[in-house]
Image (cartoon, rainbow, N blue to C red):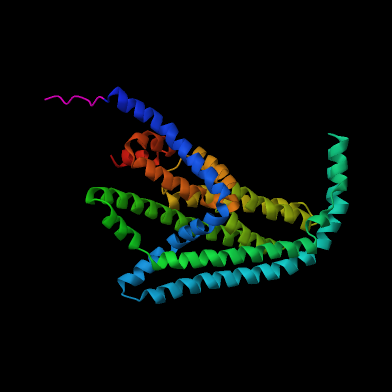
Amino acid sequence: MEVQPQRHSPASQKYSIFAIPAAIATVVVIGILLHFISDAFLTFVAALFLANIFVPIIQLFNRKNVPMVFSILLVLAVVGGVLFGLVIVLSTTISSVIEVIPKYQLRWDHVFLPAITDLASKFSPDLKQQVTDFNFTSVLQPGKLVTALSSVTGLIGSFVLILLFMLFILASHGQFIKKIERAFPASDSFHLKKMLENIDSRVRTYLLTTLLINTVAGVAMTVVLILFGVDLALLWGMLTFLLMFIPSIGSIFAIAMPILVAFLQFDSIGTPIVLAIVVIVSQLLIGSYISPRVMGSTLNLSPLLILISIIFWGWVWGPLGMILAVPITSAITIVFENIPPLVPLAMLMSSGEERKERRKKE
């Protein structure tokens, strides 16, 4: 007996056609709303994603019947140790930057400024005047560095609030799923639980693998810069670790900054060129070879969608929004996958890697 293909009624087709633009509009409106209430909501979202990293530790101790208090204290000790290390690095880096500023100023005034001024004069007199008026020391004045340090101190203060939220989230881990089971019928709660578990698993895998890859990239950058004798190698390694959380865009800045410093530092042009080649090759090796093999099709997102999401969530929440853009977009895609009219939209948002893997297995 031949199975007839299912035919959707005009009403259902119309519903499916309008469901996709309605879903896109809903995401945009929610993003705009979150932009204006970011001060009240951003700390909680950051705490939610940060707590996701430590959930495996909590689950492991729960299976070992370790009291929740000791699990929370361990997480607190780990985060506190990382914060303490960052404060030490920042304090030593500020003093090192102040020491190297005069050397960079001389190099800028006598080598780079004349060459850039001659080049700018060929294009526009106004551009030449702007280059001439540029004062290198104004960018790295001690007063501005102190202000930047104060901003970092304020950021650490905000992180303390994020840490507090994170501890409460970890302490109540697993209770939300139980509430879903009590609040919804069995069939609905099952599908909702599966969707949340899928989001939780994908986001955690992405965050942990990204953390691992960024650590390797930061350590590699630090080692290379130390071997070449570049100033502030530890600072550039730490910035590489942080900037690599922003896909595509962050790696460009992570590579460019230490190379520019090397051109200011060394008298010969050969050393900075060799350094640039080594840094670019090593970071491309990590980003283009190691990262895809470690991460695989973790999030299954289109590269164009990733770029759009970074721009959009960067506008919504600034730098932290750019860091969280990929996991947030992945969570949205999973939600769309579980809503029948929005499945075509979820397929458009995907990279198609899952389908390729299925074909290989077949």
> What secondary structure is the magenta-colored segment mainly?
loop
Residue 362 rendering spot, x and y as whole percentages: 28, 39
In this view, the residue farthest toward the left is 1
Which of these two is toward me, 131 or 59?
59
Q: How far from the left and from the top, in percent, is residue 53? A: 44, 61
In the rendered image, residue 157 lying in the magenta stretch gets the answer no
What percent of the width, then of the height, locates residue 16? Answer: 35, 30
Q: Nearer the viewer, residue 159 or 118?
A: 159
Query: What's the residue at 47%, 65% (across, down)?
Result: 166
- Which residue is more in the foreground, 300 or 147? 147
Magenta residues, start to end: 1-7
Q: Is residue 243 visible?
A: yes
Left or right of 52 on screen, residue 186:
left
Give left or right: position of 151 versus 73.
Answer: right
Q: How many marks?
A: 0
Q: Residue at x 31, y 25 (%)?
A: 11
In the image, farthest residue toward the top: 10
